[in-house]
Image (cartoon, helix red, strand yellow):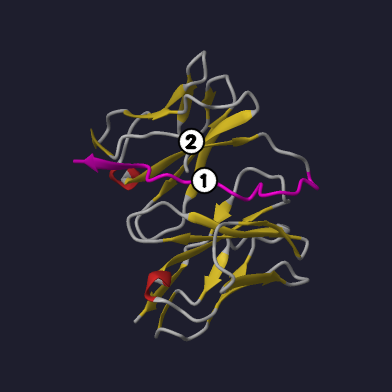
Amino acid sequence: DAGVTQSPTHLIKTRGQHVTLRCSPISGHKSVSWYQQVLGQGPQFIFQYYEKEERGRGNFPDRFSARQFPNYSSELNVNALLLGDSALYLCASTAFSGANVLTFGAGSRLTVL
Amino acid sequence: DAKTTQPPSMDCAEGRAANLPCNHSTISGNEYVYWYRQIHSQGPQYIIHGLKNNETNEMASLIITEDRKSSTLILPHATLRDTAVYYCIVRPARGGMNYGGSQGNLIFGKGTKLSVKP
């Protein structure tokens, strides 16, 4: 079975632009979470979605938004990009909202110039 | 903020046991200890978790002190492929299939950078 897949793997944007990152969970997993990892730091929680509903939100500005589709895949959108948004964006899936073992994808590396 | 404290870095000789400590002195009675690791350029990988009893799986062993204020992750025979950042995380027990809130929320600290050397 395929693991958690994310696309694109790398991308470069300029300040003020918008970006969309995509995630496909493990087959059968209904919960998707998004994390931001700045260089040298541990991942920071952004959002969790379960059954297409937002179940949790971290301390990120409204420029960050996400959604989950009927097939449980998910998109993370970031508007008005800042230099500080440069990071590795990680997606993780679990079978359901309360599960404690997350399976992470390899991430999307975003560079904002 | 992370509820755990870990040394920033450790070295281990290949083939020897790697013992990674974690302090979680404020852990609550319903919180588990989880360990993840992150190999360079990959996403974090789940290793093991436990509540109060020692646990072992094919990857590692987890030793939790009787007062639950600290734990040690043991990689019994470290290999070069075990070089990674290891994260110790505490989180509440599973709330059930329909649990709301932020159960997908793992609070990562900076972890311990383990370097396994030949």
Front residue of B81/A93: it is A93
- Magenta: main secondary structure: loop
Query: As shown in the figure, which amino acid type bears the numbered disc 2?
Result: Lys
Q: Are marks 2 and 1 on the same chain?
A: yes
Q: Which subunit holds the residue at mark 1?
A: B
Numbered disc 2: secondary structure: loop
Residue B42 place in picture, x, y as percent = 42, 59
Residue that appears at 65% across and 27% down? B30
Residue at 59% x, 71% y is: A62
Q: Amino acid at mark 1?
A: Ile
Q: Which residue is mark 1?
A: B107
Residue B103 position, x and y percent, is 66, 46
Q: Chain of mark 2?
A: B
- Picture coordinates of residue A11 (x, y %)? 42, 80
Q: Nearer the viewer, residue A41 or A22?
A: A41
Q: Is residue B113 above or below residue A5?
A: above
- The outermost residue toward the right is B98
Say which element carries label 1.
loop
Name the outermost residue toward the top: B66
Name the residue carrying label 2.
Answer: B3
Q: Quadrant of residue A104?
A: bottom right
Left or right of A93 on screen, residue B11: left
In which quarter of the view is residue A76 placed? Answer: bottom right
Furthest-left residue in view?
A: B118
* Residue A74 in view: no
Check the picture and name the quadrant holding the C terminus of chain B: top left
Q: Tell me the residue at 79%/46% (across/down).
A: B97
Q: Is residue B16 left or right of residue B94?
A: left
> Label 2 to label 1, Cα distance in Å?
8 Å
Q: Residues within 10 Å of mark 2 (few under 14, many from 20)?
A: some
The stretch in magenta equals: B97-118
Q: Evaluate if marks 2 and 1 touch, with contact meaning CB atoms under 8 Å apart.
A: yes
